[in-house]
């Protein structure tokens, strides 16, 4: 099933819609609780993040979207299988999908950064979501996000809270 995601919408009420969509996908339990990350390998990921942005939402809104560009300098594709943040009780990876005239989003098990390539997470495409926010986010503050890969490694990214 598809549902709308205000982060993807061109409408000015985007944020209110985003926060309001308590659709089934958003209430599903995540595959891993935040406390149990896979043991990290010592080898650094050949992965670089840029432009990491957490969309600012009004106080009391419990969820938001994350956009960034990931560049993989390695010869193997890298699968992002999760994201962790101290400010979010739950997180999701989202695919943007089109069904006829409708654009919506659905949960993804993984997002792939191609070998020697980029994965662009944006307001008009695939993205990450932070849910069950534990506090209000301040515009301009930097939040640490930990991106988990399928091989048990992780990349910590500083993401700035910005107005859309
Ligand atoms: Cu979304």
Image (spheres, grey):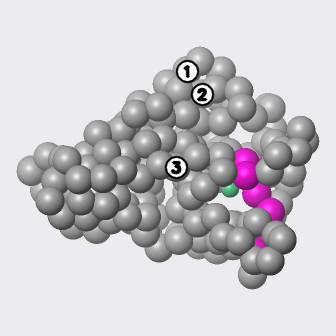
Q: Looking at this rendering, what residue extends furthest in the top direction?
A: 140
Which tag, 3 or 2, sits closer to the chain's start?
3
The reply to whether the residue tagged 1 has its Cβ within 8 angstroms of ligand 1 is no
Which residue is at a point 66% across and 51% down the rendered structure image?
A: 124
Q: In which quarter of the image is ligand 1?
A: bottom right
The reply, left or right, for residue 31 in relation to residue 60 is left
Q: Looking at this rendering, what residue extends furthest in the bottom direction?
A: 1
Graded by Cα atoms within 10 Å as few (under 14), some (14 to 19) or many (20 or more), the crowding at tag 2 reads many
**Residues at marks 3 and 2 touching, judged by CB atoms closer than 8 Å:** no
Q: For the C terminus, give its image quadrant.
A: top right
The reply, left or right, for residue 25 in relation to residue 102 is left
**Whether residue 157 is situated above or below residue 34 in the rendered picture:** above
Which tag, 1 or 2, sits closer to the chain's start?
1
Residue 23 x, y percent position in the rendering: 79, 70
Residue 39 x, y percent position in the rendering: 20, 60
**Which region is colored magenta?**
2-8
| Residue 76 sits in quarter | bottom left
Badge 1 marks a residue whose secondary structure is: loop
Task: Tell which tag, 3 or 1, sits nearer the viewer.
Answer: 3
Residues 88 and 108: in front is: 108
**Residue 123, labelled with which disc?**
none
Task: Give the alpha-carbon distance from disc 3 to disc 2, as whole Å.
Answer: 15 Å
In the picture of the structure, the residue carrying the numbered disc 3 is 121
In the picture of the structure, the residue carrying the numbered disc 2 is 161
The reply to whether the residue tagged 2 has its Cβ within 8 angstroms of ligand 1 is no
Task: Tell which tag, 3 or 2, sits nearer the viewer.
Answer: 3
Which residue is at a point 19% across and 47% down the rendered structure image?
A: 73
**Residue 141, labelled with which disc?**
1
**Residues at marks 1 and 2 touching, judged by CB atoms closer than 8 Å:** yes
Q: How many marks?
A: 3
């Amino acid at each position: 099933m598809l549902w709308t995601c205000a982060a993807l919408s061109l409408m000015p009420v985007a944020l209110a819609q985003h926060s309001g969509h308590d659709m089934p996908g958003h209430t599903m339990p995540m595959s891993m609780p935040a406390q149990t990350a896979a043991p990290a390998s010592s080898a650094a990921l050949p992965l670089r993040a840029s432009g990491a942005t957490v969309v600012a939402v009004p106080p009391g809104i419990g969820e938001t979207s994350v956009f960034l560009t990931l560049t993989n300098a390695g010869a193997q594709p890298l699968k992002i299988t999760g994201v962790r943040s101290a400010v979010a009780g739950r997180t999701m990876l989202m695919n943007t999908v089109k069904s006829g005239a409708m654009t919506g989003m659905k949960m993804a098990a993984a997002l792939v950064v191609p070998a020697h390539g980029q994965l662009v997470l944006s307001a008009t495409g695939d993205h990450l979501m932070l849910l069950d926010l534990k506090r209000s986010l301040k515009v301009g503050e930097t939040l640490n996000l930990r991106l988990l890969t399928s091989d048990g490694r992780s990349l910590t990214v500083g993401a700035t809270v910005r107005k859309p």
